[in-house]
Image (spheres, rainbow, N blue to C red):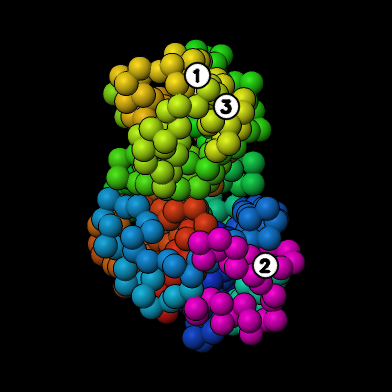
Amino acid sequence: MARNDPAHYDVVVIGAGAAGMMCAATAGQRGRRVLLVDHYPKLGEKIRISGGGRCNFTNLHATPASYLSRNPHFCRSALARYTPRDFVALVERHGIAYHEKTLGQLFCDGSATQVIDMLKAECDAGGVEWRRPCEVRAISRDGGRFRADTGAGPVDASSLVIATGGLTVPKVGATPFGYRVAEQFGLAIVPPRPALVPLSLDPGTLARYGDLSGASLDAEVSCRGGRFRESVLFTHRGLSGPAILQASSYWQDGPASDPIHVNLLPGTDARAWLAANRRAKAHLATLLAERMPKRFAQAWCDAHGLEKPVAELSDKAIEEAARALGDWPVHPSGTLGYDKAEVTLGGVDTRGLSSKTMEAAAVPGLFFIGEVVDVTGHLGGFNFQWAWASGHAAGEAA
């Protein structure tokens, strides 16, 4: 074969993350000749750092309602055909011990590297060939075949799968490569932005609450239809914690952005609670300190002019306090960006893809899977489940 003659494959998968390895393994075990290419030197690095190093690999409660997309029904088919139970069966077959945390989240008992090793073994079982670290310099299409010019020479295939992820955590290899390929072939892109990301606060708000860094409280946070009851964590730059990360996927930055709404007494009728303590000689901050960090209770009461003992508050003050405790509007100044985000919201517009196969309707043989697609899950293993389901769907069809 001449130096510029491409090596021939049935399927070339670009991106050796969760979705890419799942797709390559599935296609390879169908008997397809598969090449998996990735530019980053470490295999599955985003898997390795996930879940505090233990990989929250799925969620038992994954349903289409757990995902955001401009085309909200798109994920339904893939999720139904490859479920959390299917992935759990794979984990068990490889002897990986795991446990359930809250809200259906499954984690490895040991290390996230066990999941990486499992996916690598599944690829090897399908005879998948590897080129990594290996840059893909250009993609082209001639007739019914795709050509990828790589740092190790050209390759071609009848099916090309883009599994290059979004823009999160650029230090472990994230790039806009997948979006550029989509645009090259005429597919639309839903503008990407950071999601599941801490929120920053303006200097004035930080001056009041900035010294609470490290304090957390149980709260219900809502924004644009998303409502989540989990912990809220104060940081030196703003707000984080599971409830804030969840709400961040719904919050939109900009001059006319909506606030996020924080219920500081979730599951409690604030008005009735205050009425029951109406005769208390204690200050409201002291009462609130039974339900939340004392430092925050004091700062919040100071900000709302509620420094008096509860017994000295007027009926109007009690009413306003109850309303504010149940709905404390917080106006973020922005997010902490892709470096701190768990996932990318937006991506390849799913209206141009088959929900069954992930194939581009106008470009037969071209597939997009995983985070590069405009499907974004809630926090807690949902995005890995989308990687497995979309990768499996494409691997069955490519």
What is the number of the mark on residue 286?
A: 3
The residue pinned by badge 1 equals: 309
Q: Nearer the viewer, residue 252 or 48?
A: 252
67 lies above or below 242: below
Q: CA distance from mark 2 to mark 3?
A: 41 Å
User: Do we see residue 235 in this rendering?
Assistant: no
Q: Camera-side residue: 122 or 297?
A: 297
Return the residue nearer the eye: 211 or 29.
211
Residue 302 shown left or right of residue 142 in the figure: right
Spatial CA distance of label 1 from label 3 is 9 Å
User: What is the quadrant of the C terminus in the image?
Assistant: bottom left
Q: In x, y percent, where is residue 128? A: 60, 76
Mark 3 neighbour class, 10 Å CA radius: few under 14, some 14 to 19, many 20 or more: some
Q: Report the side of 95 relative to 204 (left or right).
A: right
Residue 103 covered by magenta stretch: yes
Q: Mark 2: which secondary structure? A: strand
Residue ID for mark 2: 108
From the viewer's perspective, is residue 217 above or below residue 83? Answer: above
In the rendered structure, are the residues bearing label 2 and label 1 in contact, judged by CB atoms less than 8 Å apart? Answer: no
- Residue depicted at x 64% and y 46%: 172
Q: Amino acid at mark 2?
A: Cys
What are the residue bounds of the magenta stretch?
85-112
Q: Quadrant of the N terminus?
A: bottom right
> Is residue 306 covered in magenta?
no
